Image (tube, rainbow, N blue to C red):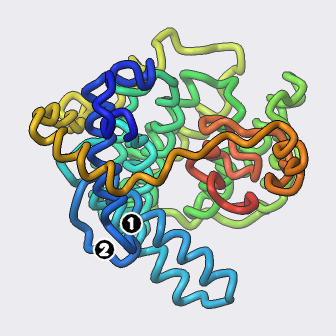
């Protein structure tokens, strides 16, 4: 923002962003800075503004939950989710946002309401990752898609995707974790129990590098002896049961990207948000002028003695090691940290 306001060389701001992207980020940030109370905004504007609206509403939800106002917390959370759905549906794009996360959260919100648009959004999430993201999480996103199919009653497709993902990477403990965690809740406890048993076999063999042994034991107890109550096709259930018995040392030859493209042909026509055009010089000049009015004075770095005195007082100690956005969430949900407890005060178990 300061680079744009001062007319500096935009390409020198950050090596990860082009001057085009820097200009768009500054323009979107200005819109948020001028927006006032974003929590009360209508769902109109740039994706970045809508993300600020969603964040403010989620914070309100957290505050209401802390005050034991469950109904108010749910209403605020649902309104934040609607903002994310609006971002996912828009034709805008901001270089500053992680759209993979937004598409997933929008899909999850839609699935909770029984809206099959959730499947479209999750397929767009996969397309986004294959197009714009360097980190390879497509197998995890594919499992999420499979679970959305199951939640929305398309059992054959969901079970097929889970089975094929397992056969592709049978030594991935998180695959067994997700199945053991979610399928009992979807009426298939016998498959959940088998997944927990296979997960325990795997972590015993591999010495549990992901520290999942205790969770697999808990999930095995939770699955218990409950009867299946799903109306999923018997042959699809048997196919996943067979996949759960795949030898841990037998892996598919295709790359994760090839697997996803084969299993989700809809990716070929899935929408990927394009980057808006570079703002014109006239627009940038106007943005620069307005930025100069809203930017606070540049802070002066405190002396080292002041920093030393503030240590331990201004920055709360970490409660544990830093968790990467795409690492498994320490709460044990089986999801990536960014899709689970990131931003919450403390991780919560699913």
Among the two numbered marks 2 and 1 on one chain, the one whose residue lies closer to the N terminus: 2
Element carrying mark 1: helix
User: In the drawing, does residue 208 fall left or right of residue 329?
Assistant: right
Q: Is residue 129 visible?
A: yes
Q: Callout 1: few (<14), some (14-19), or many (20+) C-alpha neighbours within 10 Å?
A: many
Residue at coordinates 52% horizontally, 45% vertically from top-left? 298
* Residue 64, horizontal then vertical, whole percent: 60, 84
Residue designated by label 1:
53
User: In the drawing, does residue 245 fall left or right of residue 103?
Assistant: right
Q: CA distance from mark 2 to mark 1?
A: 7 Å
Residue at coordinates 46% horizontally, 72% vertically from top-left? 57
Q: Does 213 appear above or below 207?
A: below
Q: Are marks 2 and 1 in contact (CB under 8 Å)?
A: yes
Q: Does 218 appear above or below 115?
A: above
Classify the position of the N terminus by image quarter. top left
Classify the position of the C terminus by image quarter. bottom right
* Residue 297, horizontal then vertical, whole percent: 49, 50
* Residue 87, horizontal then vertical, whole percent: 29, 55
User: In the drawing, does residue 44 fall left or right of residue 257?
Assistant: left
Residue 196 is marked as: none
User: In the drawing, does residue 235 fall left or right of residue 213?
Assistant: left
* Residue 274, horizontal then vertical, whole percent: 20, 34
Which sits in the foreground, 253 or 78?
A: 78
Q: Callout 2: few (<14), some (14-19), or many (20+) C-alpha neighbours within 10 Å?
A: some
Residue designated by label 2:
41
Which sits in the foreground, 179 or 284?
A: 284
Residue at coordinates 60% horizontally, 35% vertically from top-left? 326
């Amino acid at each position: 923002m300061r680079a744009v306001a001062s007319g500096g060389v935009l390409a020198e701001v950050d090596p990860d962003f082009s001057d085009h992207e820097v200009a768009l980020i500054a323009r979107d940030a200005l819109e948020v800075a001028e927006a006032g109370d974003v929590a009360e905004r209508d769902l109109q504007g740039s994706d970045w503004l809508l993300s600020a609206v969603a964040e403010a509403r989620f914070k309100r939800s957290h505050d209401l939950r802390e005050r034991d106002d469950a109904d108010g917390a749910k209403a605020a959370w649902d309104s934040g989710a609607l903002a994310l759905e609006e971002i996912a549906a828009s034709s805008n794009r901001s270089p500053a946002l992680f759209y993979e996360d937004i598409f997933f959260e929008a899909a999850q919100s839609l699935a909770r309401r029984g809206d099959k648009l959730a499947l479209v959004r999750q397929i767009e999430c996969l397309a986004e990752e294959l197009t714009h993201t360097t980190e390879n999480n497509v197998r995890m996103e594919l499992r999420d898609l499979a679970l959305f199919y199951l939640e929305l009653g398309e059992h054959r497709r969901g079970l097929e995707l889970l089975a094929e993902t397992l056969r592709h990477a049978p030594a991935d403990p998180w695959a067994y974790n997700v199945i053991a965690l979610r399928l009992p809740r979807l009426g298939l406890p016998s498959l959940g129990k088998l997944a927990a048993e296979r997960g325990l076999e795997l972590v015993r063999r591999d010495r549990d590098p992901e520290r999942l042994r205790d969770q697999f034991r808990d999930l095995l107890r939770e699955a218990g002896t409950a009867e299946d109550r799903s109306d999923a096709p018997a042959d699809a259930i048997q196919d996943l049961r067979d996949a759960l018995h795949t030898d841990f040392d037998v892996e598919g030859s295709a790359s994760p990207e090839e697997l996803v493209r084969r299993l989700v042909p809809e990716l070929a026509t899935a929408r990927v948000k394009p980057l808006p055009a570079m703002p014109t010089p006239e627009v940038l000049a106007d943005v620069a002028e307005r930025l100069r009015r809203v930017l606070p004075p540049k802070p002066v770095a405190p002396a080292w003695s002041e920093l030393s005195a503030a240590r331990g007082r201004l920055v709360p100690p970490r409660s544990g090691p830093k968790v990467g956005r795409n690492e498994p969430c320490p709460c044990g949900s089986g999801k990536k940290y960014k899709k689970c407890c990131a931003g919450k005060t403390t991780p919560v178990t699913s």
